[in-house]
Amino acid sequence: MDHTFWDAVTPALTETTGVLVYDCRGHGRSDKPKGPYRVEAFADDLADLSITSAGAPPWSRGRRWADASPWPSPPPIRSAPRGSALFDTTVWYDAPDKWEERAHTAETKGLNALLEFQTTRWFTDAFRASRKDVLDHSVAVFLANTAKAYADTCRMLGACNMTAALPRLKDAGPHRGRR
């Protein structure tokens, strides 16, 4: 996806905190260099934005980028600025075969072949029916990517295993998610 995926929530968040949204390599208007992609390169890209106090980006890959960052000691979650948030975060998907399947589908059948899978992951049935405008925009953004950049990203996520970074994380309090 691209930075516009967060357009519905950033106005509310910017009332009380700074918000960083950007296009990762291979996504949106960013460069789409030849892969393979590595999580460390994505972390370098984030560092190149000269972020010094934003904490981890508030999205699914945010913690992995912070864990792989070039900074000597990524900040523990509890030291992130007030209002920081991490969504749908993991250090390991433990499903490289599933990510490879997505990559292969994109490369052999195109991104259109992944639309049903993607859109049912992004939105509930009721939301898709009632907010066709958001659905259509999201589909357009997804299809604007290249199949190769998508496949390289899938393979990177399938290979990403940051469990060694877990001892550096400090518990920030009650866990609100499933884990």
Image: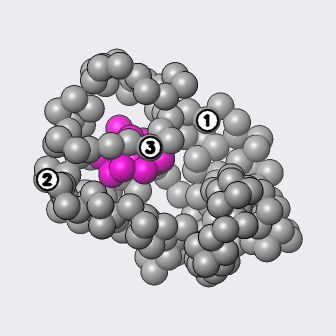
Whichever of callouts 3 and 1 sits on the residue coming sooner in the sequence is 3
The kind of residue on which mark 1 rests is: Tyr
Spatial CA distance of label 1 from label 2 is 28 Å
Look at label 3 and name its amino acid.
Phe
Query: Of 102 and 3, which appears nearest the observer?
Result: 3
Relative to 154, 19 lies left or right: left
Tell me the distance, in whole angstroms, between the alpha carbons under discs 3 and 1: 14 Å
Is residue 13 a member of the stretch shown in magenta? no
Label 2 to label 3, Cα distance in Å? 21 Å
Residue type of the residue flagged with mark 2:
Thr
Task: Answer few, some or many: residues within 10 Å of disc 2's Cα (few below 14, many 20 plus, some between 14 and 19).
Answer: few
Question: 106 above or below 137?
Answer: above
Query: What is the magenta range?
Result: 56-68
Return the residue at label 2: 52
Q: Does residue 106 appear anywhere in the picture?
A: no
The dot on residue 87 is 3
Q: Count the labels in the image.
A: 3
